[in-house]
Image (spheres, rainbow, N blue to C red):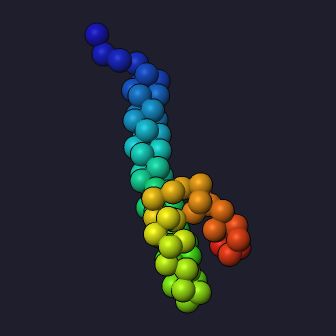
Amino acid sequence: MCKAPDEIYESGIAVGREQGEKAGEKKGEKRGEKRGEERFAALSERLLRDAQLEDLKKAVSDRAYRGRLYREYRLR
């Protein structure tokens, strides 16, 4: 038996919603990645300018320490 028009419509809506959510997630991930790279680049520039090479080395691998430096340098 054939699906009722309402069922076909609802199915299409669900598929479209799922595709839209996936596209939105991908776009958001790219935007977040770009912002994170820019933020770390700004931190790196400041640490290099201040000759804080040990801080930069530690910031690369220690997330909590990197967060502390972001706050210290007021990088949002």
Seen as rendered, the residue at the extreme bottom is 49
Q: Residue at x 51, y 61 (%)?
A: 32
9 sits left or right of 47 in the view = left
Q: Quadrant of the C terminus?
A: bottom right
Q: Residue at x 46, y 28 (%)?
A: 10
Q: Position of residue 63 (x, y in %)?
A: 54, 56
Q: Residue at x 30, y 16 (%)?
A: 2
Any part of residue 64 in sight: yes
Any part of residue 45 in sight: no
Q: Position of residue 17 (x, y in %)?
A: 47, 40
Q: In this orientation, which residue lies closer to the viewer: 39 or 32?
A: 39
15 sits left or right of 73 in the view = left
Indicate the quadrant where residue 65 lies: bottom right
Indicate the quadrant where residue 14 lies: top left
Q: Quadrant of the N terminus?
A: top left
Relative vertical location of residue 2 with respect to residue 10 in this rendering, above or below = above
Q: In this orientation, which residue lies closer to the viewer: 76 or 15?
A: 76
How many numbered callouts?
0
Seen as rendered, the residue at the extreme top is 1
Q: In this orientation, which residue lies closer to the viewer: 41 or 24?
A: 41
Q: In this orientation, which residue lies closer to the viewer: 47 or 21?
A: 47
Q: Residue at x 46, y 35 (%)?
A: 13
Indicate the quadrant where residue 18 lies: top left
Q: Position of residue 51 (x, y in %)?
A: 54, 86
Seen as rendered, the residue at the extreme front is 54
Relative vertical location of residue 63 with respect to residue 14 in this rendering, above or below = below
